[in-house]
Image: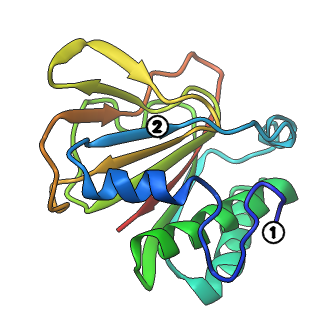
Amino acid sequence: MSSRTPTRAGRVTAWPRLTVAAFDRGAEDVLVLDRPPLPEVAAAMVAARVRGWRAGVATADIPARVAEALADLAHDCPPLAADITGLARSFLAQFGVASAELRVEVVDEASCPKFHCDSTRVRLLCTYHGAGTEYVCADAPDAVRAAPTFGLIFLKGHRHPTHADRVLHRSPPLPAGTKRLCVVLTV
């Protein structure tokens, strides 16, 4: 595991645990957290295959699933594997679930170009390369915002008990000839 996501006695440390807990209990439908970049990701994107990978993950199989995903995408970057593993472990612990869906995708076009809300409890997205996930708030629908690259965006879905239908999100448009690497965890 990388130094970006250390764990201590099962505590969540990939992000400020109390901040995410407050988001989970609160009225806001989106939480965006900045993180420092992983510079190694860009070089590995050159050889990365454009395709998506998804599977259910549980705590015990996270490292193997992440390795499987990155191998399928031809993305050889050990710091990335360590970071995704840390995010997945932290996600399961933060939301008190035994398993979640993990999706890792390299795309060369917007995979979900329309603003929408998912039928999930909570979704975490991290764009490691390319433009970050875009979102709009109901009170300012023309003000398109974007999560920063490497940042984390937590989104409540229709199944969340405090979901208020105040935020819609989408994949950003991509310039021709570019790729985006996005990791998604969902419960």
In this rendered view, identify the residue nearer to me: 118 or 49: 118
Residue at the (73%, 58%) spot, across then down: 83
* Residue that carries the numbered disc 2 in the rendered image: 32
Q: Quadrant of residue 4?
A: bottom right
The number of numbered badges drawn on the structure is: 2
* Residue that carries the numbered disc 1 in the rendered image: 1
Res. 56 in view: yes
Please state which amino acid type lies under the numbered disc 2.
Answer: Val
Mark 1 secondary-structure assignment: loop
Mark 2 secondary-structure assignment: strand
Res. 55 in view: no
Please state which amino acid type lies under the numbered disc 1.
Answer: Met
Image check: 13 left or right of 100?
Answer: right
Q: Is residue 44 above or below residue 71?
A: above
In this rendered view, identify the residue nearer to me: 146 or 23: 23
For the N terminus, the image quarter is: bottom right
